[in-house]
Amino acid sequence: MSASNDEFEEIPGTEKIFEAGHTEILLFPHPTDSPNDPLNWGWQRRYWHALLVLFYTGFTAATANNAGSTADPVLDELGIGYDIYNDAAGVLFAGIGYFAPFVAALATLYGRRVGYLVSMVLGLIGSIWFAKVMTIGDTIGNQLFVGMSESGAETIVQLSLIDIFYSHRIGTALAIYILATSVGTYLGPLVGGYIAGGPLGWRWVPWLGVIFYAVSIVVFYFGLEETYFDRERYLQYYAKDTPGVAVKGAKTVEGGEKGAGEKSSTDNEDPEKKMTIDETTAPPEPLIQKGGDPRVKKTYWESIALITPASNLKGWGGKQYLQRLIQGFRVFAFPAVIFSGLQWGAQDAWLTFYLTTEDGLWYDEPYNYSNYGVALMNVPCLIGAIIGCMYAGPLSDWFVIWMAKRNNGVKEAEYRLYLALANLIISPAGLLIFGIGSARGWYWPRPYVGLGFIGFGWGCAGDVAMAYLVDCYPDMVIEGMVGVAVINNTLGMIFTFACSDFIDAAGTENSYIIIVVL
């Protein structure tokens, strides 16, 4: 006897995504007929939303990584040394990781929009402070605010993408997210290096950040729609009034996704094969109407309200906010959260190592690079990251569907992990090639190949880890991402503080051999 879809849903990470015949993909999350369901948006509206949140991701990654491009001119003007910049980078990681639970709880209870806007205001404050830096305290303190601005990119953005894309597309959506992070991480220092070394001077690096933050806040306020939608409660409360919509079931697609009101090709099949409402269950509690009737399309002004309270919000939600912060610690008991956090955190750790190596070796003999030359070393990393994202994104979605067809239509979250096998070879090889090559003064093309391999690891590891986590725990995405952000940035902070001393003690070549073993 075949297991029902309900039984599959009780096993985290296991879903039946095909009906009999393996031709039609079951849609998860379950579609509704509500005009306020983001999954029913047209493609223009959906992609505009994705473009905004991905811009936010890339931009905050750029502002978080471009401080290093100002190190030399700041040293010349203010006498602030590289060790202070290392401390500031550690504080940056702390701001990203440890503010993540606060902004995530905000987005969960009061809507995604307020989380984005608060994060960008903090980034604006940090950038203004950075532009006016005069002391060591300024150098370190502004990075805390810059880091807090990126915490939203490590928690809310993934949730926003999942709000507007079905689960069988999530690998591709997260690949584009990782790509946006990669573009900001690698192009931010590149652009910052050219600005700092040019006629504008280093202070225009943060001043440009101020300008972009100010414009972005206005664009987001008027152009970013709220995607919070209480799907389960809507289905439970309104499904009986909507023919063809089931609480536990799902519509299907054939060659594409069907929106509300479109008939599926399975409408004439045996009704026993379709999920129906359990008429014996007690009626659910009435849906709390905090934003109007969810069956009535929101007006433009309602869709861009600063705060969209969760349907279960009680009063101002202060007690619930604290409860979410405390309960968030439970995610560290989930193996997939720990695995994903370590995978993504390792990429931040390796980033610290090769950036330190570039600053320590490539300005001197035999390379004698200028600031511009070192900045351009981000290009092979970016190329590798693009390839890694393509490999671990669209290819992983296709691979998961292909595997599910051979497993009686059942998808397992662990299918994503097969795509990580290539990275077990490519990323360590890149670290060895770059580390040993830099230490021995190899001609530049070979270390650049190593950087490309490292970039591939960045794109591949991040996408596989996050897609695996989302597949494992689809009902606790933001909680899982908070756990990943804390683990990831804690590793980044530790390695930032320890990296220079570690390389000085072990030597460049031995350091890279050790981290490859790790």
Image (cartoon, rainbow, N blue to C red):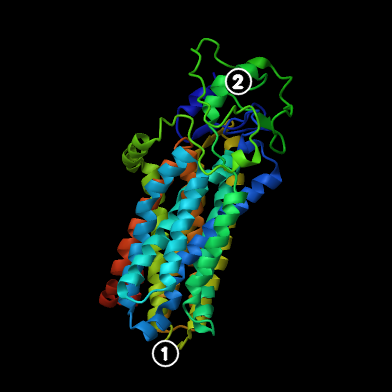
- Closer to us: 124 or 96: 124
Q: Residues within 10 Å of mark 2 (few under 14, many from 20)?
A: some
Relative height, residue 60 to residue 161 (above, below): below
User: At 52% from the left edge and 30% from the top edge, which residue is drawn?
Assistant: 290
Q: Is residue 360 above or below residue 127?
A: below
Which element carries disc 2, helix, strand or loop? helix
Residue hosting label 1: 365
- Three-letter code, disc 2: Ala
Look at the image and tell me whether residue 436 can be seen: no
> In the rendered structure, which disc, 2 or 1, sits on the residue that comes first in sequence?
2
For image coordinates 50% across by 25% down, the residue present is 288
Q: Quadrant of the C terminus?
A: bottom left
Q: Amino acid at mark 1?
A: Glu
Picture disc at residue 239: 2
C-alpha separation, residue under disc 2 versus residue under disc 1: 71 Å
85 w.r.t. 300: above or below = below
Residue 234 seen? yes
Relative image position of residue 432 (x, y in whole percent): 41, 71
Q: Residues within 10 Å of mark 1 (few under 14, many from 20)?
A: few
Taking depth in this image into account, of 334 and 29 the one nearest to the observer is: 29
The x, y position of residue 208, in whole percent, is: 53, 70
The picture places residue 73, in percent across and down from the top left corner, at 42, 83
Q: Is residue 512 above or below residue 267?
A: below
Q: Quadrant of the N terminus?
A: top right
* Residue 212: x %, y % from top left: 55, 64
